[in-house]
Amino acid sequence: MSEKNIASKNQNIILEDRSKLSISGVEHVDNFNENTIILGTIKGGMTIKGEDLNISKLNLDDGNVIIQGVINSIIYSNKEASSGKGGLLGKMFK
């Protein structure tokens, strides 16, 4: 799916019993491990923190991801931070 088609969609976040998180509008996965998952979404960067986190489904064509594990927090950051261009090293080497 093109970036234009993803951007025209709404973003939905569904958390079930703090153990299953479904997110739409995901553009890319920046980083993940069992305690932290960092995503780029149509609404900005998103950091999910928890325990035993696992990406059980990832479809970037549709912009959908399902994360399982113990979800402790969901944090948004601004759009520039999620683009991969606005990081510390990117700012240093402009």
Image (cartoon, rainbow, N blue to C red):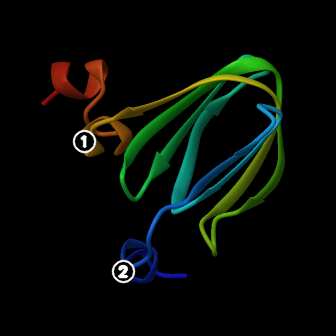
Q: Amino acid at mark 2?
A: Lys
Residue wearing tag 1 = 80
Q: Is residue 91 left or right of residue 8?
A: left
Residue lying at 37% horizontally and 72% vertically, measured from the top left: 7
Of the 4 image quadrants, the one containing the C terminus is: top left
Q: Secondary structure at mark 1?
A: helix
Q: Amino acid at mark 1?
A: Glu
In front of the other: 84 or 50: 50
Residue lying at 73% horizontally and 16% vertically, measured from the top left: 35
Residue lying at 34% horizontally and 45% vertically, measured from the top left: 83
Residue wearing tag 2 = 4
In front of the other: 14 or 8: 14
Q: Is residue 79 above or below residue 47?
A: below
Give how far across and how far down residue 68 sits, in percent.
84, 38
Give how far across and how far down residue 88 sits, in percent.
27, 18
Of the 4 image quadrants, the one containing the N terminus is: bottom right
Q: Is residue 80 left or right of residue 29?
A: left
Which of the 4 image quadrants contains residue 12?
bottom right
